[in-house]
Image (spheres, rainbow, N blue to C red):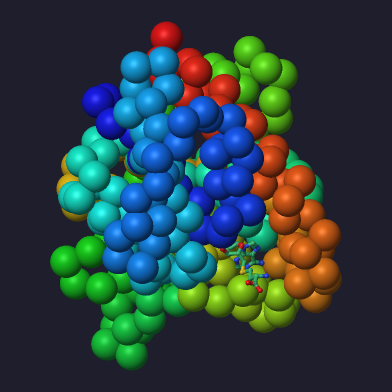
């Protein structure tokens, strides 16, 4: 690892990360701001993409191809599906899928297009390090499937479809696109989320109430993982 990318989707998700570092250098590029820092000798680029798969793809690609990042960590919030995931709890993705990618009319499985795959895996090595950090810090972390799509999910029908079709544990709007970019460019990828809501009829309300605290939970764990990576 020579240069690390740390991404969120929303400002609230990277604020607690930026607050952790001194001497942040701002670079404006492609309608976004990238924050460069050097932490104990390691170059890090931090950015929030804006919400959704397209913006997340743009930011992940930019961090790797323009800024030269060779490892990518994502931190943010998600809607929980697995009943073991309560608001504030942490999930790391072992694989991700696009729940809204649908050419099933042609007999393909949900989430699949030719040349792609339904599920994209994240870096096993980074997950193992994260699990060690969780044990050392007595953090409850679930490892599971995250489903991504360009929808804020709050209806039972949408949630049930995603749960039954992809056996997903959590859902959000950016992770799978970042994983696709990293997979294509051979960059180890890690996707961490803290639960902000449970993708039900209260999701909009819960999201607003818990975005900040859950984003901080995710960021704090990510910082601990970063410290481990630097040892
Ligand atoms: N309140 C924001 C919109 C938030 S969209 C605004 O008005 O600007 C939800 C964000 O959190 C996305 O980045 C997504 O990745 C994540 N997320 C959390 N809960 C979600 C849910 N139930 N469905 C989809 N994405 C969710």
Residue 49 visible: yes
> Residue visible at 25% across and 26% down?
2
Q: Nearer the viewer, residue 149 or 26?
A: 26
Q: Quadrant of residue 17?
A: top right
The residue located at (30%, 60%) in the rendering is 29
Camera-nearest residue between 203 and 211: 211
Image location (x, y in percent) of residue 138 = 71, 19
Q: Looking at the picture, does residue 227 appear above or below residue 183? A: above
Percent from the top left, x then y, of residue 190? 42, 39
Question: Quarter for ligand 1?
Answer: bottom right
Quarter of the picture containing the C terminus is: top left
Q: Is residue 54 left or right of residue 154?
A: left
Which residue, as the protein is rendered here, is positioned at the far top?
Answer: 231
How many discs mark residues in the rendered view?
0
At x 48%, y 65%, the residue is 50
Residue 97: percent from left, percent from top? 41, 61
Give the image location of residue 109, x and y in percent: 35, 73
Is residue 118 shown to the viewer in this render?
no
Q: Which residue is most to the bottom?
A: 105
Considering the image in quadrants, where does the N terminus appear?
top left
Q: Is residue 201 above or below residue 38?
A: below
Residue 16, quarter of the rendered image: top right
Q: 209 or 44: which is nearer to us? A: 44
Q: Is residue 228 above or below residue 150?
A: above
Residue at 41 percent across and 16 percent down: it is: 40
* Viewer-nearest residue: 138 or 62: 62
- Figure check: 99 above or below 117: below
Left or right of residue 41, residue 67 in this image: left
């Amino acid at each position: 690892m020579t240069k690390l990318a740390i991404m969120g989707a929303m400002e609230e998700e990277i604020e607690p990360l930026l607050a952790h570092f001194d001497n942040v250098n701002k670079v404006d590029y492609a309608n976004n701001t990238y924050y460069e820092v050097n932490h104990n000798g390691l170059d890090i680029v931090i950015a929030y993409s804006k919400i959704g798969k397209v913006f997340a793809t743009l930011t992940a690609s930019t961090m790797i191809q323009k800024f030269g990042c060779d490892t990518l960590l994502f931190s943010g919030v998600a809607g929980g599906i697995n009943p073991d995931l309560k608001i504030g709890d942490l999930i790391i993705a072992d694989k991700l899928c696009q729940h809204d990618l649908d050419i099933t009319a042609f007999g393909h499985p949900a989430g699949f297009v030719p040349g792609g795959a339904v599920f994209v895996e994240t870096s096993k090595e980074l997950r193992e390090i994260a699990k060690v950090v969780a044990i050392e810090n007595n953090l409850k972390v679930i490892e599971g499937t995250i489903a991504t799509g360009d929808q804020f999910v709050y209806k039972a029908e949408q949630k049930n479809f995603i749960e039954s079709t992809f056996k997903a544990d959590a859902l959000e709007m950016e992770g799978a696109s970042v994983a696709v970019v990293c997979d294509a460019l051979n960059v180890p990828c890690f996707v961490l989320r803290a639960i902000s809501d449970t993708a039900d009829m209260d999701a909009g309300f819960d999201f607003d109430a818990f975005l900040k605290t859950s984003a901080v939970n995710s960021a704090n764990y990510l910082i601990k993982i970063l410290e481990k990576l630097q040892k």
